[in-house]
Amino acid sequence: MMQNYRGDVMDLRVVRRVEQHPQAWRVWQPVIIPGQKKRHLIVAFGAMVNGKKDMGDILATLSTDDGDTWEEPVMIFDHRQRQGIVQFAYANPVLYRAPGQDVIWCFAMRCPIAQKNSEESQLVGAFTADGGYSWTQVEMAMHYAGPLITCSSIVTTEIDSVHKYLLPAHRNTLQEDPRGSRDHFVLSSTSLLEWKLEAYIPQPTNARVFLHEGNIAPGETPKELWIVMRTADYDETDRTTDPPRAYSSVSRDGGQTWSVAKPEPDLHNAKSKAFFGRSSNGTHIYVYSDGPPQREKAPGFPNGGRTSLRYKTKNPGDTLSEEKTFYDAWIKNSYPTLIEIAPGDFRCVWDSGTPDTPRTHIHFGKLQISP
């Protein structure tokens, strides 16, 4: 499929369009994982139900030819299925396969559909044992009692000689509660079914920042983990940090404790989810939306930000690379997610739109990075 664009991503395909979902007005926040067989890929994404903000259905679609074509999606979480008299809507899927297992999990958020947005959500889960063709919902055992917002994948770790899974999440209870907070934290589990609060990411000591939508990746030494987070002003969330930067924190004990969050001077973030991860050869990669915030016009961005996607890489012990173009087609693009299938060989998804309308379709592409 030929498209007029600039960037290093290759073999571009459209996974799904909003017109294929009559009940939805946007498709958004896709995630990707290898399937059970060679060249199989699974993408989960949200279909934002009409009249609601950031909530709807979660669906999964399968490719059997390494992303060249995509099958009709199946439902994972359906907003039309009531739980007794309560009706939920869903958001922010996370796909994960535990090492050595064939079962693939989809974690997401559920929120009573009467809410105006999905900020006050609970964790839900479902699994597929047949490579993505069908999904079975499972109720989580939650020892963390507050609301949460998921956004990025699970990593494995070892804490006090116990194997654990870590899931980054945040909350924004300050939006509706003057005694609430905007904090980033990490949940842990030994089973993927029972989840506990493992740690908070400590706020900067000079001025608080709205830390959210962080990605955890292995660092450069054993037991070291890095988290890189989207940011906004803590009290006025329509504003970016000054300057607009991602913040990071480091754990050197497998995720049990974390350093005070600090700005990353060379990692741009203007209130939009970015991807941060590490390849098997040790190279870290950061993929992000450049420019101003989504609705803020600026020179070179006549329709606001969240347009072109850029990326930077960092080899072990080295400094960050210069900015490179991931994908730029003069349209809206946001929320990239990557998965490595071979050393330095990534499969990528993100939501795209038109020059002035976000999230009208889901894009897929391939990216190769060299150490």
Image (cartoon, rainbow, N blue to C red):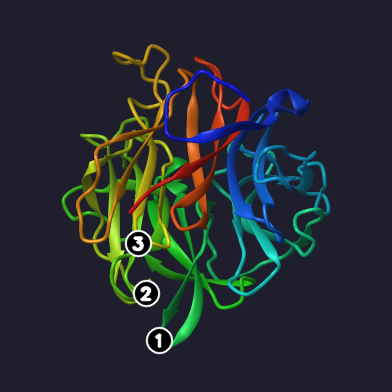
Q: Quadrant of the N terminus?
A: top right
Mark 2 vs 3: CB contact within 8 A = no
Three-letter amino acid code of the residue under disc 1: Asp
- Observer-side mark, 1 or 3, equals 3
User: Residue beneath label 2, please?
Assistant: 256
Q: Residue furthest left?
A: 206
Marks 1 and 2 close (CB-CB < 8 Å): yes
Q: Which residue is mark 1?
A: 160
Of 26 and 364, nearer the camera is 364
**What's the residue type where badge 3 is placed?**
Gly
- In the figure, is residue 338 to the left or right of 181? right
Measuring 45% from the left and 53% from the top, which residue is drawn there? Answer: 170
Q: Residue at x 32, y 14 (%)?
A: 300
Distance, label 2 to label 3, CA atoms, is 22 Å
Q: Nearer the viewer, residue 131 or 27?
A: 131
Q: Could you tell me residue 172's position as x and y percent?
A: 45, 47
- For discs 2 and 3, the disc positioned in front in the rendered view: 3
**Numbered badge on residue 276:** none
User: Which residue matches tag 3?
Assistant: 282
Front position in the image: 3 or 363: 3
Q: Position of residue 322 (x, y in %)?
A: 24, 38
Q: Amino acid at mark 2?
A: Gln
Which of marks 3 and 2 precedes in the sequence? 2
Please rate how many residues cluster around mark 1, counting C-alpha atoms within 10 Å: few if below 14, some from 14 to 19, many from 20. Answer: few
Instruction: Give above or below for 348 relative to 139.
Output: above
